Image (cartoon, grey):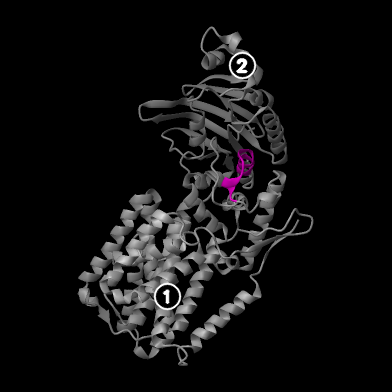
C-alpha cells in the first residue's frame, strides 16, 4: 500500500500569485482609495500578529497575554536600524532584511519567555508573559536614546500593500508547514497532554522553544511593518491593550485554525475602523467582544477547523480501504 | 545474558507515605513479566519511575546496561521503552493517524528547517512515517478511523490506538499498565492472544501490570507481587497463585480458599 502527500493543487499557487500581483498593482493605479489600501495593510499586519499568537495560544494551548512585547521589540529594532544605522540610500533594498532583523530580535526575546514555560503553565505563564509585556514597555519608556515616552520617528514609509501581502503569505506558509509536520503535531500534543507527550518521545522543551521562537519572530516582523507604515512608534502602541486586541482576534477567529486567524484579524480590524465615529468608545469593543466570545462561543468562528486548502491530502494507494483526507 | 531492564533498590516517597521500599527486579530480553498486587501497592509508581515521570531519589534503573535514572521521559522513550496507560492518555483532539505518528517523534529524520521548507527529505520521511503508521493501523484494524479525532472512538479502539502509538517507536521494552481494564471475558481472551502475537511480531520484552488473574496466569512467564511498596513474592504464575502471602495481601487472612475462585474470575 503506497501513500503519498499530494502537492497542493496548482490553483492555490496561482491564486496566491494573483493576489500578490494585485497587491503590487493596486496602490499604484488609482483603482482603490488610499484609505482602503491603508486598512488592508493594517488587516495584513494584524493577520500576521494573530497567526503568530495562535501558534502559542491555540496550537500549543499556552496562555501568552503579552505578545505585543514581541511586536514592540521588532518595531523598535527595525526602526532603529533603518533610521540610525543604515544609509538612507540603501533603505528600500534592505527593507526585508531590516524586518527580518527586527523579527530575530523579537525571537531572541521569545527564547527568554520560552524558558519559564518549561515549568509553568496556564495562569502562571500568563503572569510571566504579562510581566514581559510590561517590562518591554517600561524599558522603552525609559530609554531616552529612542525617544522614551515621546516615541521614535524618522522611518521612511516603506511598508506597501505588496510587502504586507508577501509577509502574510510567508507567515501562513511557514506556520502551515509547521503545523502539518511532526513538530506541529507535537506542539498540539503539548496542548492535549504534556506528560503523555513526553512519554511518547516528544521533546516538549525543544518544541516549546521552537514555538516561542517562531511566534515571536513573526510578531516582530509585524512590528517592523507597523513601524514603517505609521512612521512613528511609541511605547504605548505596544501595551497590554494591544496584546488584548491580539487575543480578541485569535479567539474570535478560533484557536488552532490558520483560516480562523485570518478571518479574526480581518473582521476585527475592519470592525474597529467602522466604529471610528464612536471615538474613544471603540476601545471598549475589543475587551467586550472577548467577554462575549468566552461566554457564548469560546471556540470562535473556526475553532480547530481548517480550510481544505491548507491541509495536506493523503491518498492511499491501490488495495486499501479508502481515500482519506489527512488532518 | 545481560538483563534488558534492571531496577535496583528503588524507593519513592509521596510526602510521608513510602510508596516503594528498596524495590528491585531484573527482566531479561524477550521475557514477559507480570507485576501484580492490590491497589495502592506501588505498581504504577514503578512504571512512573522507570519512564521518568517521577524523579528518582533513591535507587537506580539500568536499561540495556545504561543508567537511565536521571533521563527525561522523552529520552527514555526514544531509547526504547514504550508505555500504555491505565486511564488511556491519547491526544484527544488529534486524529488517530496523528496520535500514532507522534509515537515516532524521536525517529522522524527531518529537522525543523526541512519541515518548514518542505524539503525533499521531509517529504520522503513524512511519507515513510505515514506509511508505517498506516501499517500499524491496519494491524489493529483502525485504518478506516485514521482521520477521526481519537476521543470519539469507543474504549476498545482507544486502547488499540495507544498500543499502535507505543509500537511505532520500535520499542524494545513495552510497559503495559492494566491493558485488560474494563474488558469483558471475550475481549480479555482476544487481548491475551494479541499480546502474545505482538510480542513475537515485534520482538518485545514486556512488563505487565494487571489485576485480572486470567491474563496474568495465561501470559506471564513469571510474576512479581507488590504489597505496600515491597516485593512479597516472585516466581512462576502457578507458584504465586497459591502463595500464602499473596492470598493474604489480596484477600486477608482465613479467607484463602473461599475467595480464590472469585479472584480467578477477574475482579478489580
Residue at the (53%, 36%) spot, across then down: B87
Label 1: how many Cα within 10 Å (few below 14, some 14–19, many 20+):
many
Residue B118 appearing in the image: yes
Determine the secondary structure under disc 2: helix
Q: Which mark is residue A207?
A: none
Label 2: how many Cα within 10 Å (few below 14, some 14–19, many 20+):
few
Q: Chain of mark 1?
A: A
Q: Position of residue A264 (x, y in %)?
A: 44, 67
Q: Which residues are magenta?
A: B149-162
User: Is residue B10 positioned above or below A97 on the image?
Assistant: above
State left or right for residue A76 relative to residue B170.
left
The N terminus of chain B: image quadrant: top right
Residue at the (58%, 66%) spot, across then down: A310
Q: Are marks 2 and 1 in contact (CB under 8 Å)?
A: no
Residue A259 is inside the magenta segment? no
The C terminus of chain B: image quadrant: top right
Q: Which residue is mark 2?
A: B262
Q: Quadrant of residue B193?
A: top right
User: Is residue A133 positioned above or below B43 on the image?
Assistant: below
Q: Quadrant of residue A297?
A: bottom left
CA separation, marks 2 and 1? 69 Å
Residue B158 is inside the magenta segment? yes
Q: Which mark is residue A43?
A: 1
Residue A209 appearing in the image: no
Q: Chain of mark 2?
A: B
Q: Position of residue A90 (x, y in %)?
A: 39, 88
Amino acid at each position: 500500500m503506497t501513500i503519498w502527500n499530494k502537492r497542493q493543487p496548482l490553483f492555490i499557487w496561482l491564486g496566491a500569485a494573483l493576489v500578490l500581483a494585485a497587491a503590487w498593482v493596486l496602490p499604484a493605479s488609482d483603482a482603490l482609495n488610499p484609505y482602503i489600501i491603508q486598512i488592508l495593510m493594517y488587516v495584513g499586519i494584524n493577520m500576521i500578529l494573530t497567526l503568530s499568537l495562535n501558534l502559542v495560544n491555540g496550537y500549543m494551548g499556552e496562555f501568552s497575554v503579552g505578545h505585543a512585547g514581541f511586536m514592540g521589540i521588532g518595531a523598535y529594532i527595525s526602526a532603529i536600524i533603518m533610521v540610525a544605522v543604515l544609509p538612507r540610500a540603501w533603505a528600500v533594498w534592505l527593507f526585508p532584511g531590516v524586518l527580518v532583523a527586527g523579527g530575530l530580535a523579537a525571537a531572541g526575546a521569545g527564547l527568554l519567555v520560552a524558558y519559564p514555560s518549561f515549568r509553568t503553565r496556564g495562569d502562571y505563564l500568563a503572569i510571566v508573559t504579562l510581566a514581559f509585556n510590561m517590562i518591554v514597555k517600561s524599558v522603552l519608556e525609559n530609554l531616552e536614546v529612542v525617544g522614551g515616552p515621546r516615541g521614535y520617528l524618522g522611518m521612511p514609509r516603506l511598508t506597501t500593500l505588496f510587502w504586507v501581502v508577501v509577509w502574510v503569505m510567508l507567515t501562513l506558509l511557514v506556520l502551515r508547514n509547521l503545523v502539518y509536520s511532526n513538530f506541529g503535531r507535537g506542539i498540539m500534543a503539548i496542548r492535549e497532554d504534556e506528560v503523555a507527550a513526553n512519554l511518547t518521545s516528544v521533546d516538549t522543551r525543544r518544541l516549546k522553544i521552537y514555538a516561542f521562537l517562531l511566534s515571536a519572530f513573526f510578531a516582530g516582523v509585524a512590528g517592523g511593518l507597523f513601524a514603517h507604515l505609521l512612521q512613528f512608534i511609541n511605547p504605548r502602541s505596544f501595551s497590554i491593550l494591544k496584546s488584548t486586541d491580539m487575543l480578541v482576534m485569535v479567539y474570535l477567529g478560533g484557536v488552532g485554525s490558520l483560516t480562523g486567524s485570518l478571518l479574526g484579524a480581518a473582521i476585527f480590524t475592519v470592525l474597529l475602523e467602522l466604529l471610528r465615529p464612536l471615538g474613544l468608545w471603540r476601545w471598549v469593543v475589543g475587551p467586550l467582544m472577548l467577554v462575549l466570545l468566552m461566554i457564548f462561543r469560546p471556540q470562535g468562528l473556526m475553532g480547530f477547523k481548517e480550510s481544505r486548502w491548507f491541509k495536506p491530502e493523503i491518498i492511499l494507494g491501490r488495495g486499501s480501504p479508502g481515500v482519506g483526507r489527512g488532518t | 545474558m545481560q538483563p534488558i531492564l534492571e531496577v535496583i533498590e528503588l524507593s519513592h516517597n509521596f510526602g510521608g507515605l513510602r510508596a516503594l521500599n528498596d524495590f528491585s527486579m531484573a527482566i531479561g530480553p524477550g521475557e514477559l513479566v507480570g507485576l501484580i498486587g492490590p491497589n495502592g501497592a506501588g505498581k504504577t509508581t514503578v512504571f512512573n519511575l522507570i519512564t521518568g515521570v517521577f524523579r528518582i531519589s533513591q535507587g537506580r534503573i539500568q536499561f540495556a546496561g545504561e543508567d537511565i535514572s536521571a533521563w527525561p521521559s522523552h529520552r527514555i522513550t526514544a531509547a526504547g521503552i514504550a508505555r500504555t496507560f491505565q486511564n488511556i492518555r491519547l491526544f484527544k483532539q488529534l486524529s488517530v493517524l496523528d496520535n500514532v505518528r507522534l509515537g515516532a517523534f524521536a525517529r522522524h529524520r527531518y529537522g525543523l528547517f526541512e519541515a518548514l521548507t518542505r524539503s525533499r527529505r521531509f517529504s520522503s520521511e513524512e511519507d515513510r512515517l505515514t506509511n508505517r503508521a498506516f501499517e500499524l493501523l491496519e494491524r489493529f484494524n483502525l485504518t478506516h478511523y485514521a482521520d477521526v479525532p481519537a476521543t470519539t472512538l469507543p474504549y476498545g479502539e482507544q486502547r488499540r490506538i495507544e498500543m499502535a502509538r507505543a509500537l511505532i517507536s520500535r520499542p524494545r521494552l513495552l510497559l503495559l499498565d492494566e491493558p485488560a481494564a474494563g474488558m469483558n471475558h471475550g475481549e480479555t481472551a482476544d487481548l491475551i492472544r494479541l499480546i502474545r502475537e505482538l510480542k513475537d511480531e515485534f520482538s518485545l520484552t514486556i512488563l505487565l501490570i494487571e489485576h485480572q488473574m486470567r491474563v496474568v496466569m495465561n501470559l506471564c512467564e513469571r510474576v512479581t507481587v507488590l504489597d505496600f511498596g515491597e516485593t512479597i513474592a516472585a516466581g512462576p504464575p502457578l507458584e504465586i497463585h497459591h502463595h500464602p502471602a499473596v492470598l493474604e495481601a489480596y484477600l486477608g487472612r482465613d479467607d484463602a480458599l473461599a475467595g480464590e475462585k472469585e479472584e480467578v474470575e477477574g475482579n478489580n
